[in-house]
Image: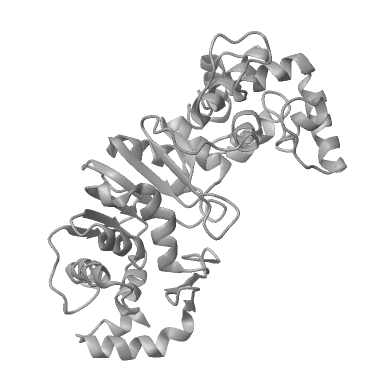
Amino acid sequence: MIKEFFSRKRNIEERKEFFKKIRKYLIKTGDSTYTYNDPLFQETMHSLTGAYDESVHKFCIPSEIQKRKYLLDLFSGFGYNAAAALELNPGLKIDMIEKNPEILALGLLIPEVCEAHKIIKAAIESSLYNIGFIKNRVYETPKNIRLFVEDALNFRYENNYDVIFHDAYSPKRNWKPYSLIFFKKLYKVLDENGVLLTYSSSSPMRSSLLEAGFYIWGTEAYKRKRSGTIASKRDLKLKNLSREEERVISLTDLGIPYVKNRDDLREKLRNKVLFSSSVKQCFENIYNFGEKFQITDAEKNKAERSIKKMELTKKEIIYVVCPQYEKCICGKCSRRYENTTERIKEMRYRLLKLKGINVKDFITHFFERFKTDKCIVLI
């Protein structure tokens, strides 16, 4: 329908009238902006609490966008993230990447959410015109905004950015944008003082970031229980993850990064090298040290069975989780670990050490066995 509409030259008024006809196919979110439920992924493109609101609070504010110079906006969709960033920082240079021309064309039709949105629409229009998807332009092409109608996963990145917005569909719908391979690409093009933002809090996604070389932290949760994630090449001393989140990533099979044959790896490593994901935050409840968490008897029993299969003693488990505490509780530490990234890496190292596996052998063994990425652990 959209492709057919743009097969002829269309002025602004025609675009507005056509939007009225197709508005029923969109969803109006909490801030009166629109989103779309993608039938392929069976997921909306934006939060229903507010599409534009999400751009401001989950991407722009935690990235301190006013201080940034060059934004890489991945999986740009309607252009809300780029529009919000440009509204808050008019001098920002932006590269946008979105592979779906129909979604971009729909972005031309939706009402403008701010003044900067007109400039983003101009960039969208220019790119769609250049590839022949639309037949005319009604905006003046902007100088500091570029849009590439390409697949971000296969794009040849050549520039250096001090901020990256990563806004793909959720990992449970499509894990490849959150893969170790892709994050390694992004690591190479991020400035030494730059930041990468994603709304996702997925454990394997965060594990992929860590394995790619990033430090990670949680952003402030906004209108939902879970936080987003911010990553950088250096320690920015931001908000660390909770103890239970750190343990899930470092010690359980949920912490295996997004790589090919990940499900096979989880099955092979569970209760042999890594704990079952049922352990989660349960160490305190079983061994009565440190903070307490509320868990059911069923969860506790699952955790106890997992620990029994791992054949680790209470003393050994205390040694593994000791990096999370302000003071040493195992009697073997020579230093303390100040951030989430250091703690996750050290806990994974200690667990492998107790299982008699050094990092190099661990990587080589499972690469040869499963024919997947060599980097399947966090250290």
Residue 247 at x, y percent in the picture:
64, 32
Q: Say if 356 sits above or below 109 in the image.
A: above
Compared to 16, does 250 lie above or below?
above
Displayed quadrant of residue 370: top right
- Residue in the image at 23% along x and 72% along y: 118
Q: List x then y, in percent, for residue 199.
A: 48, 52
Q: Is residue 10 left or right of residue 34?
A: left
Vertical arrangement, residue 168 with respect to residue 105, above or below: above
Residue 41 visible here: yes
Foreground pick, 378 / 220: 220
Q: Position of residue 304 (x, y in %)?
A: 83, 30
Q: Looking at the image, which residue is at 55% across and 60% down?
A: 223
Q: Find the residue positioned furthest to the front.
A: 327
Residue 166 appears anywhere in the view? no
Q: Picture quarter containing residue 238?
A: top left
At 16% from the left and 75% from the top, the residue drawn is: 139
> How many marks on residues?
0
Q: Residue 329 appears at what percent x and percent y?
A: 68, 16
Quarter that holds the N terminus: bottom left
Front residue of this view, candidates 241 and 134: 241
Q: Is residue 310 left or right of residue 219?
A: right
Please give the name of the residue rendered at 72% of the width and 27% of the height, measured from the top-left corner.
290
Way the structure is coloured: one colour
Nearest the viewer among 363 and 328 is 328
